[in-house]
Amino acid sequence: MRNFKILYAEDDETLAFLTKDNLEQNNYEVIHCSNGKSALKIFEEEEFDICIFDIMMPKMDGFELAEAVRKIDVDVPIIFLSAKTLKEDRIKGLRLGADDYLVKPFSIEELLLKIEIFLKRSQKNISPAKTIYEVGKYHFDTKNFILFNDEEKVGLTQREAELLKLFLDHKNSVLKREQILTSLWGTDDYFMGRSLDVFISRLRKILANEEGISIENLHGIGFRFSIG
């Protein structure tokens, strides 16, 4: 079995050495870049299973890098590692399509667990009987994370696709907030709750012009995805 390949962008050489060494000891193949510009060039030339980006880097910061990567690949998992602790920075990263955001100093054990979770999700097989859903004027391809019709194609992140599929599997029913968080992240905490709000806002925006489709916020309870 091949080793999973990680693109790791970090300008702190000491931290990068330690993190890369730990990842390689756990049988990952790691390509390290010290700035965002060189990381993007390598991403354009090679295929990766997951990306790990610092935010404050020279030449191209992590936010710009993630945005550029998402234009190339809408579903490769992206994890931010950053000393930036403001809620606004975390939300910005998630809006750009990142799957998670770990604040420095981080635990290598936690990072390894996150990587394992995202790789399992990206590699798991989806039942052939449930790979295509009808969502308004769109077809939803759960395997490739896209909404499409004859005129356009909208790429989703893996997390957005998982959330939309969960809503469709429970359409017109109430999903408790903690149920959604546990299904998608395996945990129910404050930061994951804020992340969930970002993904729901994104889905609302994508489906805003679809008649009969709504994501209703039931205060203190959860959400209901209604589709007529």
Image (cartoon, rainbow, N blue to C red):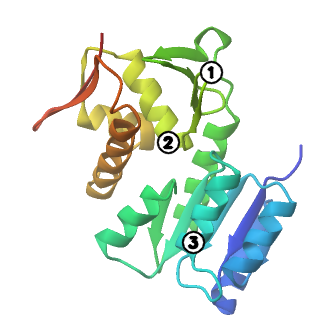
Q: Earlier in the sequence, mark 1 or mark 3?
A: 3
Q: Earlier in the sequence, mark 3 or mark 2?
A: 3
* Res. 97 in view: yes
Q: Does 202 sit left or right of 133 as displayed? A: left
Using the image, determine if residue 61 lies above or below residue 112: below
* Res. 188 in view: no
Amino acid type of the residue tagged 3 in the rendering: Glu
Per the model, the C-alpha gap separating discs 1 and 2 is 25 Å
Label 1, secondary structure: give it.
loop
Q: Which residue is mark 1?
A: 150
Per the model, the C-alpha gap separating discs 1 and 3 is 31 Å
Per the model, the C-alpha gap separating discs 3 and 2 is 20 Å
- Of badges 3 and 2, nearer the viewer stands 3
Q: Position of residue 71 (x, y in %)?
A: 64, 54
Q: Which residue is mark 2?
A: 159
Q: Earlier in the sequence, mark 1 or mark 2?
A: 1
Q: Which residue is mark 3?
A: 64
Q: Quadrant of residue 223?
A: top left
Res. 141 mark: none
Q: Position of residue 58 (x, y in %)?
A: 63, 89
Q: Does 39 sit left or right of 164 as displayed? A: right
Dot 1 alpha-carbon crowd within 10 angstroms: few under 14, some 14 to 19, many 20 or more: few
